């Protein structure tokens, strides 16, 4: 007596592996999407938003804005920088996929006694931020003018604009801070 062959209800081995790989990839992307804001919020050197000002009105989507941020130099105690960046509005800006404009202004000042936490390199990054989904970053770098005992900060966008990057420079002369700060450190002793 011949038995009827049961229909195969399992997927072939290769199809099952591709299905599992696809499912794991989607799960990994979903977890990354969920945790992205938390990881961004826990970053050590996030600048503080001081204020935003609308510059271009849009009827339905968010306006274009100028935003001013403040950040303390993580390696040099007693120095703070403020920078203003344009932020694109519209739906692409709202979704975070707009390529931001490279016009950035910078002002750095001594806000207390200046103390160097460690040895530094000329042109080290103080702060870095992505300005588009791909390729463009804004960077604040620092250096030392040893002859004048002055810290020099420069902000620039690393995507070339018509042959040269847009940039801005600010200097912080190292001065005594009050009567108790008689021993002024020399930046040349801390930069290589």
Image (cartoon, rainbow, N blue to C red):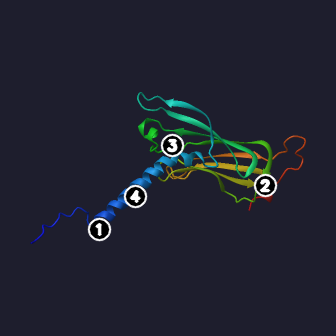
Q: CA distance from mark 3 to mark 4?
A: 37 Å
Q: Please, is residue 32 above or below residue 81 in the view?
A: below
Instruction: Choose the circle earlier in sequence order: 4 or 1.
Output: 1
**Element on which disc 1 rests:** helix
Nearer-the-camera pick, 92 or 41? 41
Instruction: Choose the circle earlier in sequence order: 3 or 1.
Output: 1
Nearer-the-camera pick, 6 or 117? 6
Label for residue 24? 4
Q: Does residue 133 appear in the picture of this structure? A: no
Residue that badge 1 annotates: 13
User: Where, quadrant-wise, is the N terminus in this rendering?
Assistant: bottom left
Q: CA distance from mark 1 to mark 2?
A: 65 Å
**Element on which disc 2 rests:** helix
Q: Nearer the viewer, mark 4 or mark 1?
A: 1
Where residue 180 appears, x then y in whole percent? 90, 43
Contact flag, marks 3 and 1 (Cβ < 8 Å): no
Residue that badge 3 annotates: 101
Q: How many other residues sit within 10 Å of disc 2, few (<14), some (14-19) or many (≥20)?
A: many
């Amino acid at each position: 007596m011949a038995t009827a062959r049961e229909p195969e209800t399992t997927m072939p081995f290769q199809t099952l592996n591709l299905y599992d790989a696809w499912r794991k990839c989607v799960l990994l992307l979903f977890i990354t999407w969920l945790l992205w804001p938390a990881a961004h919020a826990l970053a050590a050197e996030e600048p503080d938003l001081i204020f935003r000002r609308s510059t271009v009105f849009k009827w339905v989507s968010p306006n274009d804005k100028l935003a001013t941020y403040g950040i303390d130099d993580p390696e040099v105690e007693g120095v703070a920088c403020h920078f203003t960046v344009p932020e694109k509005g519209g739906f692409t800006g709202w979704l975070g996929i707009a390529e931001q404009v490279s016009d950035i202004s910078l002002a750095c000042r001594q806000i207390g006694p200046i103390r160097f936490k460690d040895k530094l390199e000329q042109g080290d990054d103080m702060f870095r931020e992505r300005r588009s989904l791909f390729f463009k970053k804004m960077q604040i770098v620092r250096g030392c003018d040893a002859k004048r005992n002055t810290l020099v900060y420069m902000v620039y966008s690393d995507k070339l604009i018509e042959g040269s990057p847009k940039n801005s420079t600010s200097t912080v002369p190292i001065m005594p801070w009050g009567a108790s700060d008689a021993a002024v450190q020399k930046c040349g002793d801390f930069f290589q």
